[in-house]
Image (cartoon, helix red, strand yellow):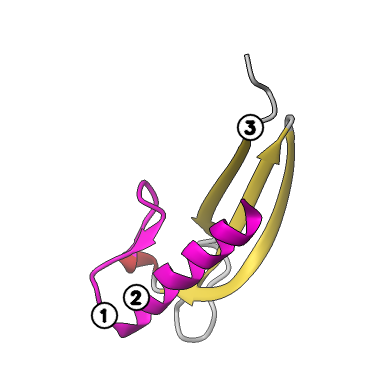
Amino acid sequence: MNDNKLNILFYLSKTRLNKQKRSPIKCRLTFIGKRKTFSTGLFINPQNWFSKLHQAKPPNPDNNYINTQISLISQKIN
């Protein structure tokens, strides 16, 4: 079994809302059983976040920008 798999997870920190009622998007990397978490610097309305897809929906300029930035972060990590 290959234990050297890198897992990338994007999730919301719903308890940390800012004044505009938006949550920060965080990224968690798991490699060889160790986790590292960092903030992406992106904020989103929690109602627009789909955790199973790791995407913001419905399509609009703000959500498209967030999805593009998440994709770029994933590509840089890989």
Query: Splitting the image into 4 quarters, where does residue 46 fall?
Result: bottom left
| Residue appearing at x 66%, y 47% in the figure | 29
Q: Is residue 35 magenta?
A: no
Residue 28 at what x, y percent from top left? 63, 50
Q: Residues within 10 Å of mark 3 (few under 14, many from 20)?
A: few
Q: Is residue 63 left or right of residue 42?
A: left
- The N terminus appears in which quarter of the rendering? top right
Count of labels in the image: 3
Q: Are marks 2 and 3 in contact (CB under 8 Å)?
A: no
Residue type indicated by callout 2: Asn
| Residue appearing at x 65%, y 66% in the figure | 39
| Residue appearing at x 73%, y 30% in the figure | 33
State the residue position of label 2: 64
Real-space Cα distance between discs 2 and 3? 28 Å
Query: Splitting the image into 4 quarters, where does residue 21 fall?
Result: bottom left
Residue 53 at what x, y percent from top left? 35, 50
Q: Are marks 1 and 2 in contact (CB under 8 Å)?
A: yes
Q: Is residue 52 above or below residue 3?
A: below
Real-space Cα distance between discs 1 and 2? 6 Å
Q: Secondary structure at mark 1?
A: loop
Which is more foreground, mark 1 or mark 3? 3
State the residue position of label 1: 60
Residue 23 at what x, y percent from top left? 50, 70
Residue type indicated by callout 1: Asn
| Residue appearing at x 69%, y 60% in the figure | 38
Question: Which numbered circle lies on residue 31?
Answer: none
Which range of residues does the magenta coloring cover?
49-78
Q: Are marks 1 and 3 in contact (CB under 8 Å)?
A: no
> Reading the chain from its start, which is encountered first: label 1 or label 3?
3
Real-space Cα distance between discs 1 and 3? 33 Å
State the residue position of label 3: 5
